[in-house]
Amino acid sequence: MDEKFDFNMSEFLGAIKPDNTYIAGYNKDKTTRDEIDISLLVPSPFHPIPLYGEKKEKEMVESIKAFGVLQPILIRESKNQIGKYEILNGRNRVHCSELAGKTTIPYILEEYSDADAQYVTLDAIIQQRGFVLVFF
Protein backbone atom coordinates (compact mmCIF):
# COMPACT_ATOMS: atom_id res chain seq x y z
CA MET A 1 0.00 0.00 0.00
CA ASP A 2 1.45 3.32 -1.06
CA GLU A 3 0.32 6.04 1.38
CA LYS A 4 1.34 9.64 0.94
CA PHE A 5 2.65 11.36 4.04
CA ASP A 6 0.55 14.49 4.50
CA PHE A 7 2.01 17.05 6.89
CA ASN A 8 0.88 20.65 7.21
CA MET A 9 3.62 22.75 8.84
CA SER A 10 1.24 25.69 9.39
CA GLU A 11 -1.15 23.54 11.40
CA PHE A 12 1.74 22.01 13.34
CA LEU A 13 3.25 25.37 14.25
CA GLY A 14 -0.17 26.79 15.07
CA ALA A 15 -0.60 24.06 17.68
CA ILE A 16 2.55 25.10 19.53
CA LYS A 17 1.78 27.29 22.53
CA PRO A 18 4.59 29.09 24.35
CA ASP A 19 4.89 28.37 28.07
CA ASN A 20 5.74 30.94 30.72
CA THR A 21 9.51 30.51 30.55
CA TYR A 22 11.64 33.53 29.80
CA ILE A 23 12.50 34.00 26.15
CA ALA A 24 15.14 36.57 25.21
CA GLY A 25 13.66 39.63 23.58
CA TYR A 26 10.31 39.48 25.34
CA ASN A 27 9.03 42.17 27.68
CA LYS A 28 8.95 41.41 31.40
CA ASP A 29 5.29 40.45 31.15
CA LYS A 30 6.41 37.66 28.74
CA THR A 31 3.50 38.31 26.39
CA THR A 32 4.94 40.73 23.87
CA ARG A 33 8.37 41.20 22.37
CA ASP A 34 10.33 44.42 22.19
CA GLU A 35 10.38 45.59 18.57
CA ILE A 36 12.50 48.22 16.85
CA ASP A 37 11.76 50.26 13.75
CA ILE A 38 13.71 48.76 10.85
CA SER A 39 14.67 52.26 9.66
CA LEU A 40 16.91 52.59 12.75
CA LEU A 41 19.05 49.60 11.76
CA VAL A 42 22.35 49.63 9.87
CA PRO A 43 24.54 46.71 8.78
CA SER A 44 27.46 45.75 10.99
CA PRO A 45 30.85 46.59 9.50
CA PHE A 46 31.96 43.14 10.70
CA HIS A 47 29.56 41.15 8.50
CA PRO A 48 31.50 39.93 5.43
CA ILE A 49 28.94 37.44 4.07
CA PRO A 50 26.38 38.40 1.37
CA LEU A 51 22.64 38.19 1.93
CA TYR A 52 20.74 35.01 1.07
CA GLY A 53 20.22 34.00 -2.54
CA GLU A 54 16.86 34.43 -4.25
CA LYS A 55 15.41 31.01 -3.33
CA LYS A 56 16.23 31.14 0.38
CA GLU A 57 15.21 34.81 0.52
CA LYS A 58 11.79 33.99 -0.97
CA GLU A 59 11.30 31.15 1.54
CA MET A 60 12.15 33.45 4.46
CA VAL A 61 9.82 36.21 3.21
CA GLU A 62 6.94 33.71 2.98
CA SER A 63 7.72 32.41 6.48
CA ILE A 64 7.76 35.94 7.91
CA LYS A 65 4.46 36.74 6.22
CA ALA A 66 2.91 33.60 7.71
CA PHE A 67 4.45 33.53 11.20
CA GLY A 68 6.34 36.78 11.74
CA VAL A 69 9.96 36.88 12.86
CA LEU A 70 10.34 34.03 15.35
CA GLN A 71 13.86 34.82 16.57
CA PRO A 72 14.88 38.34 17.64
CA ILE A 73 17.83 39.98 15.92
CA LEU A 74 20.90 40.96 17.95
CA ILE A 75 21.92 44.63 17.82
CA ARG A 76 24.20 47.16 19.49
CA GLU A 77 24.23 50.95 19.39
CA SER A 78 26.14 52.28 16.40
CA LYS A 79 29.33 54.08 17.28
CA ASN A 80 29.33 56.00 13.99
CA GLN A 81 25.66 56.92 13.52
CA ILE A 82 23.83 58.47 16.45
CA GLY A 83 20.37 57.00 16.98
CA LYS A 84 21.11 53.95 14.82
CA TYR A 85 21.81 50.33 15.74
CA GLU A 86 24.18 47.84 14.12
CA ILE A 87 22.78 44.43 13.20
CA LEU A 88 25.17 41.85 14.67
CA ASN A 89 22.97 38.83 13.99
CA GLY A 90 19.84 38.79 11.84
CA ARG A 91 20.66 40.81 8.74
CA ASN A 92 18.68 38.42 6.52
CA ARG A 93 15.70 38.57 8.90
CA VAL A 94 15.75 42.37 8.63
CA HIS A 95 16.04 42.34 4.84
CA CYS A 96 13.30 39.73 4.40
CA SER A 97 11.05 41.52 6.92
CA GLU A 98 11.27 44.64 4.77
CA LEU A 99 10.37 42.59 1.68
CA ALA A 100 7.44 41.11 3.64
CA GLY A 101 6.14 44.63 4.35
CA LYS A 102 7.10 44.76 8.03
CA THR A 103 8.28 48.04 9.59
CA THR A 104 9.42 46.69 12.97
CA ILE A 105 11.31 43.60 14.10
CA PRO A 106 11.92 41.90 17.48
CA TYR A 107 15.38 42.56 18.87
CA ILE A 108 17.85 42.04 21.69
CA LEU A 109 20.07 45.04 22.46
CA GLU A 110 23.52 44.29 23.90
CA GLU A 111 26.60 46.37 24.66
CA TYR A 112 29.65 44.99 22.87
CA SER A 113 33.13 46.32 22.21
CA ASP A 114 34.21 46.25 18.57
CA ALA A 115 36.21 43.07 19.20
CA ASP A 116 33.27 41.34 20.89
CA ALA A 117 30.83 42.54 18.20
CA GLN A 118 33.10 41.10 15.52
CA TYR A 119 33.36 37.80 17.40
CA VAL A 120 29.58 37.54 17.95
CA THR A 121 28.88 38.31 14.29
CA LEU A 122 31.40 35.80 12.96
CA ASP A 123 30.28 33.14 15.44
CA ALA A 124 26.68 33.53 14.24
CA ILE A 125 27.81 33.15 10.62
CA ILE A 126 29.78 30.01 11.44
CA GLN A 127 26.86 28.46 13.32
CA GLN A 128 24.32 29.33 10.64
CA ARG A 129 26.27 28.58 7.49
CA GLY A 130 28.84 26.10 8.73
CA PHE A 131 31.90 28.07 7.67
CA VAL A 132 35.31 27.35 9.07
CA LEU A 133 37.54 30.36 9.59
CA VAL A 134 41.29 30.09 9.33
CA PHE A 135 43.38 32.78 10.97
CA PHE A 136 46.96 33.47 9.83
Image (cartoon, rainbow, N blue to C red):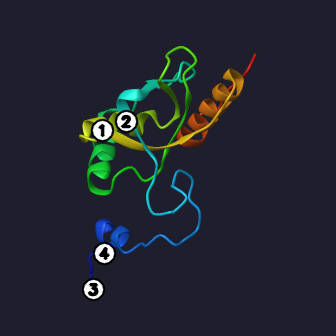
Q: Which mark is residue 77?
A: none
Counting from the top left corner in percent of width and height, residue 28 is at: 55, 58
Q: Which residue is mark 1?
A: 103
Is residue 50 among what the camera can see? no
Counting from the top left corner in percent of width and height, residue 82 is at: 50, 18
Whether label 2 touches label 3, CB < 8 Å: no
- Which residue occupies 47% across, 50% down? 71
Q: Which secondary structure, mark 2?
A: strand
Counting from the top left corner in percent of width and height, residue 132 is at: 65, 32
Q: Quadrant of the C terminus?
A: top right
Q: Which residue is mark 2?
A: 37
For marks 1 and 2, give the CA distance.
Answer: 6 Å
Q: Which secondary structure, mark 1?
A: loop
Q: Which secondary structure, mark 3?
A: loop
Q: Which residue is mark 3?
A: 1
Q: Which mark is residue 5?
A: 4
Query: Of label 1 and label 3, which has the lower sequence position?
Result: 3
Is 34 or 114 nearer to us in this picture?
34
The crowding category of the residue bearing disc 2, from other C-alpha atoms within 10 Å (few below 14, some 14 to 19, many at least 20), is few
Is 107 or 49 nearer to us in this picture?
107
Residue 35 falls in image quadrant: top left
Q: Which secondary structure, mark 4?
A: loop
- Which residue occupies 52% across, 23% down? 44
Counting from the top left corner in percent of width and height, residue 74 is at: 54, 39
Q: Which amino acid, mark 2? A: Asp
The answer to whether residue 120 is above or below residue 136 is: below
